[in-house]
Amino acid sequence: MTSVRLRSRPVTATGQLADLAAAHAVFGCVLRELAPPDAAPTVLDGAARVLLRHQRIALRCAVARISPLGAHRYSGPVQRMTDTGHWVDLDADGLAGLVAAELTGRTDLANDEFAEQVRASRDTVARLLAERPAEDPTPTGEPAIDAYVDSEQSLVFGHPHHPTPKWRSGDPDRWRAYAPELRTSFRLHWLAVPDELVAGAGPFDPLVAALDPPRPPRGHRVLPVHPWQLSLLPPTHPRLRDLGEGGVPVRPTASVRTLYAPAADLFVKTSLHVRITNCLRKNARYELTGAVALTDLLARVPLPDGVGLLAEPAYRTVDVAGPDEAYGTILREGLRPHLRPGDTPVLAAALAATPLVTPEPVAWWRAYVGLLVPAVLRCWLRHGVVHEAHLQNVVVVLDGDHRPVRMLLRDLEGVKLDTERWATWPDGVPAQVRYGPSDARRRIVYCLFVNHLGGICGALADARPGIERRLWQELRAVIEAVAADLDDPPELRALLDGEPLVAKANLLVRWHRDADRAAPFVPVPNPMGGPR
């Protein structure tokens, strides 16, 4: 029987491990975002090197795995070259200070939050490592669902190419109760909203009934809200009634604000006025209406066998003057309709987070990319639908032999329509749900190839050193087949001819304190390009 094992990182003191992880994340961002095109990074004598050119300071870090994508796996401390020509170790604080000085010099902008956010992210990881329960304290007893919840709540270190992957605004003592990494479980908070103040669409009441909500007063409808949100922004409208916490238990997923109720097999995507990675996690009105409109539209866009979509058929909010993002809630369908006996759903990001061990990695990879890549590329190039299929937006279904047999795409907030492929804008879809052709290409290339497949490929290569280039060439063969089926579109021909891939510049967008939609993109090597 084929098996896949997720190996744990070596156990060290939590503070040291957290500091190394923070330093590696910042160093990886520097290598990706600040080196090209001014000073191409190199790997020399087993270490990646980069020059902070504004300060004329050289940095290096030992490389445990050299990636043709430039997404190396690092080992040991980051070091800087001193004026006397010696290499000395840097902790995360020291590295953040150097990077802040470099960015200040390059951009003529100051960011007095940056170093503190790196430190807070590091401290969060240390706390998660120290306090994470060894076992799930509230399992369902259903192995497939428990494995899925565990995968959502396993991402202690977070995004490997983000300078502050675990920084969250707010008091850590407050968010601890809602941290997915601490294997938490809690109950939703419920409001009763007068009928005339309810805004929404879709079968909200029939779906939410599975959560066992409290009974509202006559003339009111129930609205589930994240309890953390209510502690941050208590309801101020005099006609809203607080029904307290109740209903079936929910488990926070990797996104923190999206909650899964195993008993109901339903996801609840809540508004949460907390900044996580780059964004304040609130549901704007266009995101609420867009979720239901896209659910209807995507029901008419075919997906191949083995690929499904977790639809978002209903939303509800409070229809009040001014911003109403405090209460917007989206309901997303669950996993069980997509599972067969013996299947196990796993968040893709969990597969990428540790070495991925399988006796037949090439065959496993072929099955994986053969499901995901044609589906995403055809949706884009044939139907004009851009799925942001990054590691947190895809649930992988493994069969009884732990082979990938289905892919579930999720989170319609990230789905956009390519305006070049929609001559007539579909009724009911908000204008914000659109990308121009260049934005569509960047998002597909980054989310699918760099973020998602780069992560999975790296995890397989961590377990089987030297295999990574072979895997990228296997992926090239899949793209060639899709290109042939679609009459060789120029977007895919450019990839096959070696045009650089792109990556979202998380360091730069954090430094500029911009919204995520304003993030710049930087070129990264294309391991698929050129002759096979």
Image (tube, rainbow, N blue to C red):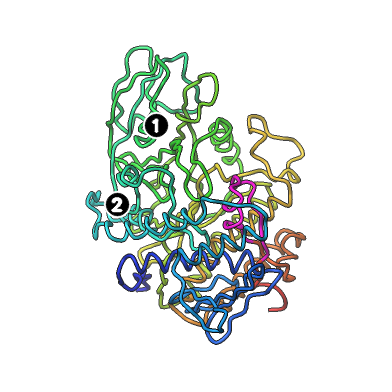
Residue type at numbered disc 2: Arg
- Give the numbered dot on residue 207: 1
Can you say whether 71 is above or below 251 in the image?
Answer: below
Q: Is residue 456 left or right of residue 415?
A: left
Residue 506 part of the magenta segment: yes
Seen from the viewer's position, the closer of residues 105 and 459 is 105
Residue carrying label 2: 183
Query: Where is residue 216 drawn, in percent x and y?
Result: 32, 19
Query: Where is residue 70 drawn, in percent x and y?
Result: 59, 72
Seen from the viewer's position, the closer of residues 131 and 251 is 131
Seen from the viewer's position, the closer of residues 322 and 222 is 322
Q: Which residues are magenta?
A: 503-523
Front position among marks 2 and 1 = 2
Residue 465 part of the magenta segment: no
- Give the numbered dot on residue 265: none
Which quadrant of the view contains residue 414?
top right
Residue pictured at 69% horizontal, 45% vertical: 435
Q: Are marks 2 and 1 in contact (CB under 8 Å)?
A: no
Q: Secondary structure at mark 1?
A: helix
The quarter of the image holding the N terminus is bottom left
Residue type at numbered disc 1: Leu
Q: Distance of mark 2 from mark 1, alpha carbons?
A: 25 Å
- Mark 1 is surrounded, within 10 Å at the Cα level, by few (under 14), some (14 to 19) or many (20 or more) other residues, namely some
